[in-house]
Amino acid sequence: MRGAPLLAKNRQVVMRKIPEGFPSANDFEIITVEMPELGIGQMLLKTRWLTLDPYMRSGFMNEPNNRQSPIIGGTVSEVVESRSDRWRVGDLVVGYYGWQEYAVGSESDVQWSNPDMPNEKWDESLGPASTALGILGMTGYTAYQGLLNVAKVKADETVVVSAASGAVGQVVGQLAKIKRAQVIGIAGGPEKCAYCIDELGFDACIDYKGSRFVNELQQAATQGIDIYFENVGGDVLEAVIPLLNPGARVPICGFISHYNLMPTERRPTPLERLKSAGLPVLDKDGSREGFRFFSFSELAAQHPDAENALCEMSGWIKDGRLKYRESITSGIESCIPAFMGMLSGKNFGKTMVRL
C-alpha cells in the first residue's frame, strides 16, 4: 500500500501579483517547497497532467488572497506513496491540485470544492489519462451539459459556437452534428476554420478576424440561429444577436474576450447584453427561449447521469464520431507561456501540460 517513503521537493507556479489586463510572465513565479510527511489516510501524488483554462484568469487570478498560492486547476496524478486504504501506489487520481509537481492528497479531497465530486481513479479503458481533463473531463461535461441538457438541441436546428476550435467549442460542434443539427463555428484565422470544417465536420466556420465577418456569418446562417453556444462575448456576440430566431437558446459557458480587460475597458457581459436585448433567462428545464450561465458541475456532480454521459462520449470517440485535439507542452516551466498563449488564442483544443 505505502511504497517506499519519498522525500520530494515540490515546484509550484504561484502568482507574484494580481495581473492588470493581459497577464505577463512577471505576474508569476516558480518556487520550490518541501513536501510534508504523510499522515494516516494521505498519499503523495506526482502530477502527470495539469490543465490550463480561461476560467483561471477570470476567477482565481483576480483574488488578492491567492497570491503566493499554486494556481488551482484540474490534474491527473500518480500515487507514488500511500497511507490510504483506498489508494494504491500507481493509481491515477483525477483531482484539483493545480500547477505543481507534487501534492499531498487525502481520502476526503473533492474536486472544484464540490462535495458531490470526490477525487476518482481514472479508468484508462475509457481513454488516455489526458482525456480525463479534456474531452472526457470538465471540457466534455461542459459541452454535453450546455448543448444537450441546457439548450436541448434538436435535429435540423442551426447551432453557432464561438471559439469553435477550442477545448469546449470543438466538442460542442461535433455533438451538434451527432444530433443532426447544422453547425456553424466561429474561430480566429483560416487554419482554425479549416480544421473545424475538414477535420471536425462543421458545415461552416467563420473567421471573426476577417474584415467581412458579420456579412459572412449572416450568409452562413440564412435560416437564423436557434442555439448560440457562448464562449467569447464582445463583438462576436454583437454579430450573433440580430440573427437569433424566436425560441433561440443561448447557453453561456464563458466570455474570454472580457477576462483581460482593464477596469476602464469594461463592457457589458453576455448576461447583461442579452438581458438588455430582451431575452429572458432560460428555464432550468429548457422549456422556453432565453439564456443561462451554466457550469459543467451541473452534470458532473450528478450520478448516474455523469457516468452515462462519460460512457456515451467515450463510445463516440471509439467509433470515430467524436474527435479531439490537444495543445500539449512539457514541464512546469511551460505553464506560464502556454497559459498566456491560450488566452491569446494560440491553442488548438484543450491546453495541457505533461509532467
Image (spheres, rainbow, N blue to C red):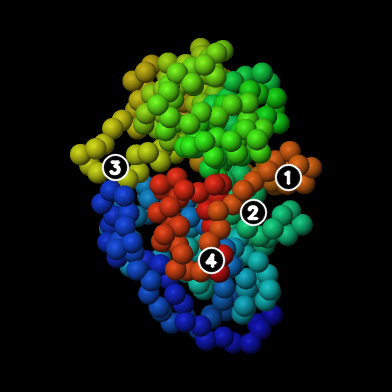
Looking at the image, residue 283 lies above or below residue 168: above
Give the foreground label among 2 and 4: 4
Which element is circle 3 on?
A: loop
Q: Earlier in the sequence, mark 3 or mark 2?
A: 2
Q: Earlier in the sequence, mark 4 or mark 1?
A: 1
* Percent x, y of residue 109: 54, 63
Q: CA distance from mark 2 to mark 4?
A: 16 Å
Q: CA distance from mark 2 to mark 1?
A: 11 Å
Q: CA distance from mark 3 to mark 1?
A: 37 Å
Residue marked by disc 3: 261
* Percent x, y of residue 79: 62, 73
Q: CA distance from mark 3 to mark 4?
A: 29 Å
**Left or right for 267, reference 56:** left
Looking at the rendering, which quadrant does residue 129 occupy?
bottom right
Residue kind at label 2, given as amino acid type: Thr
In the rendered image, which quarter contains the C terminus?
bottom right
Residue kind at label 4, given as amino acid type: Ser
* Percent x, y of residue 148: 63, 31
Residue marked by disc 4: 330
> Residue at left 68%, top 70%?
91
Residue marked by disc 2: 131
Residue kind at label 1, given as amino acid type: Ile
* Percent x, y of residue 77: 59, 67
Q: Earlier in the sequence, mark 3 or mark 1?
A: 3
Q: Are marks 3 and 1 in contact (CB under 8 Å)?
A: no
Q: Is residue 174 visible?
A: no
Which element is circle 2 on?
A: helix
